[in-house]
Image: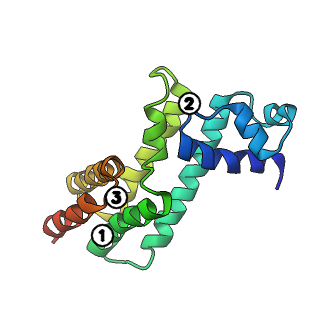
């Protein structure tokens, strides 16, 4: 792997597990086994690295979601499968939650560069549900339910509310 790829691979793990603020550039450089000059050749700042990480995470996450739900063609099973995807990710990533929301809580409110990437991810998630459900109010309802499941499952280290949400969806989508 190239130095840039090694840096992003380590960042992917460290930002997701430790958080943005708790992960230092020196730790990333050391664990990625790259020279400091090489790091700064690829990323001018930690903020630029964070943007690259979020873009990688966005692609990874949506690819996983699409693969997980690809067998479902009908609306209700596809939406339910999306919630099953949350359960899958919670098991895979030990209830670490949403990298985007985690970073949101760590950046200053005036960090527009990172905020734009975070907002773009959430716009795409909302658009994902709008592409499945042709009723905008209902798709927004499902989107908000999905988002709340991410937070609640991280907070309580439990998939219980995801399962409850799937029952709610059964009543919302006829």
Q: How is the image coloured?
A: rainbow
Q: Quadrant of residue 23?
A: top right
Query: Is residue 57 among what the camera can see?
Result: yes
Q: Are marks 2 and 1 in contact (CB under 8 Å)?
A: no
Give the label on residue 21, or none. Answer: 2
Residue under pointer 1: 80
Question: At which x and y percent is residue 81?
Answer: 35, 71
Residues at marks 2 and 3, CA–CA distance in whole angstroms = 31 Å
Query: In the figure, is residue 80 to the left or right of 49?
Result: left
Residue occupied by mark 3 = 129
Q: Is residue 82 above or below residue 43?
A: below
Q: How many marks?
A: 3
Q: Residues within 10 Å of mark 2 (few under 14, many from 20)?
A: few
Q: Which mark is residue 22?
A: none
At numbered mark 3, what does the secondary structure look like: helix, strand or loop?
helix
In the rendered image, residue 40, in percent from the top left (x then y), is placed at 80, 31
The reply to whether residue 134 is visible in this rendering is no
- Of the image marks 1 and 3, the number of the one nearer the N terminus: 1
Give 27 or 170, whichever is nearer the viewer: 27
Point 45% across, 61% down: residue: 89
Instruction: Characterize the local packing of mark 1: few (<14), some (14-19) or many (20 or more) Cα atoms within 10 angstroms.
Output: some
Q: Earlier in the sequence, mark 2 or mark 3?
A: 2
């Amino acid at each position: 792997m190239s130095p840039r790829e090694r840096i992003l691979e380590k960042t992917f793990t460290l930002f997701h597990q430790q958080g943005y603020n708790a992960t230092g550039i020196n730790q990333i450089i050391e664990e990625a086994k790259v020279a400091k000059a090489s790091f700064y050749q690829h990323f001018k700042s930690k903020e630029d690295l964070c943007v690259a990480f979020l873009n990688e995470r966005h692609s990874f996450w949506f690819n996983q979601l699409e693969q997980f739900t690809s067998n479902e063609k009908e609306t209700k099973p596809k939406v339910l499968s999306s919630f099953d995807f949350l359960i899958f990710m919670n098991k895979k990533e030990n209830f670490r939650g949403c990298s985007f929301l985690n970073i949101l809580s760590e950046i200053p409110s005036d960090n527009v560069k990172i905020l734009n990437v975070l907002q773009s991810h959430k716009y795409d998630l909302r658009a994902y549900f709008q592409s499945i459900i042709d009723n905008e109010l209902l798709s927004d309802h499902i989107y908000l339910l999905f988002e709340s499941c991410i937070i609640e499952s991280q907070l309580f280290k439990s998939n219980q509310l995801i399962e409850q949400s799937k029952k709610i969806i059964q009543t919302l989508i006829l």
